[in-house]
Amino acid sequence: MAIKVGIIGAGGMVGYHIDGFKQGGGEVVAIADVNLDAATKVAEEHDIEMVFESVDDMLESSEIDAVSVIVPNKFHAPLAIQAMEAGKHVFCEKPPALSAEEAEEMVAAAEKYGTTLMFNFNNRARPESREMMKLIDAGEVGRINSAQAKWIRRTGIPGFGGWFTNKALSGGGPMIDLLHMLDLAMYFMGYPEAEYVLGQTFDDFITNKDFKGPWGIPDREDGVTDVESAAHGFIRFKTGQVLNFQISWAEMVKREEVSVVFQGSKAGGKVERLFGTDGLDETAIDTCELYVQEDGESVNKVLRAEECEDMGRINSAANFIEAIDGKSEPLNTPDQALTLMKIIDAVYESASSGKPVAI
């Protein structure tokens, strides 16, 4: 029988989740949102049978096997834990939680209740990433010694005074919001355990509306804007591998860049997407390359992958269903999510103290 899914939150990512669960062989049977009108609209558009204003009421349904969490970051951990206590598998939007402490509670709940817990680290599910991972798994890259992770924007602040810019609701700015390339780089590297982190955040432009992103998120004049606009840092892992990162909503760069570049003992590589006007126009350029030496010559190999405008979001949700069904290996694990949150916490701590932070 198909895995039956209930969705918590009728926000902008809901369509990708629904399409992905269906692609994976699941069935979306319920949606809950405190904004009942929004939930009803999504239900009508996607032929979803049950609509709830209360998450408590939805989780009481014995028809639901799994839950998708698409809400502001502050509510990721409590809702995911509540769902797992009710015996539901959980697919949670990124970031995993506000902090490593919360992520640890989520991991413990998954172990206690025997449920699958996965996160929408969707860039692992991009065709380019999957092609690169095949080569890494086959040993063609060797040990990845170093990597550089970027998600940088020139004008990408997602509104002023809303939950994205309110640290109590979001956990932080771009460091926690645009964590995808940091995650992808570590995924390629084998998700090693960090030894120490050195980080610095910047708040230039964070209240300058010239740097607002183009997604139409409304500003709140009475809201809070207390997060960073950019974060840079360096991670040394206990394996001796190293990683540096540059992540920003607003920074003086030419164009939006989403990339992982790495240097291995046998080959280097790059997975990259360059946007035109911060993700909205049609001039995005995708690159997936492997760099090798053959017969004394430097050879750059282009890896062919199918086009994927949604950057793996649908494939990521499909993998959740397939993992529950035992048809595919999960693309991410709770322990990896906890490792990532420990690093993010350490970046903010290092930025505050001005010193490296041991993990």
Image: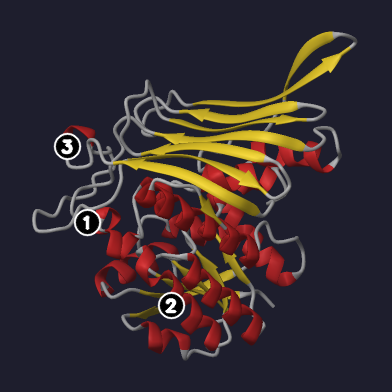
Q: CA distance from mark 3 to mark 1?
A: 14 Å
CB under 8 Å between callouts 3 and 1?
Answer: no
Q: Which mark is residue 208?
A: 3
Mark 3 or 1 closer to N-term?
A: 1
> Vertically, is 101 above or below 299?
below
In the image: residue 208, left or right of residue 97: left
**Quarter of image, res 259:** top right
Residue at 45% across / 50% down in the picture? 347
Q: Name the spot of residue 103 as percent of width and height, x first.
A: 52, 69
* 238 and 281: which is toward the camera: 238
Q: Amino acid at mark 3?
A: Asn
Colour scheme of the rendered structure: secondary structure
* Few, some or many residues within 10 Å of mark 1 (<14, 14–19, 20+): some
Q: Is residue 176 visible?
A: no
> Vertically, is 359 above or below 124?
below
Mark 2 or 1 closer to N-term?
A: 2
Quadrant of the rendering where the N terminus is positioned: bottom right
**Quarter of image, res 52:** bottom left
Mark 3 or 2 closer to N-term?
A: 2
Residue at 41% across / 29% down in the picture? 256
* 25 and 75: which is toward the camera: 75
Residue furthest out toward the right: 295
Residue ID for mark 2: 79
Secondary structure beneath dot 1 equals loop
Residue ID for mark 1: 162
> Vertically, is 55 above or below 206?
below
Q: Amino acid at mark 1?
A: Gly
Q: Amino acid at mark 2?
A: Leu
Residue at 34% across / 27% down in the picture? 277
Secondary structure beneath dot 3 equals loop
Quadrant of the rendering where the C terminus is positioned: bottom right
Q: Name the spot of residue 272 as percent of width and height, x first.
A: 56, 30
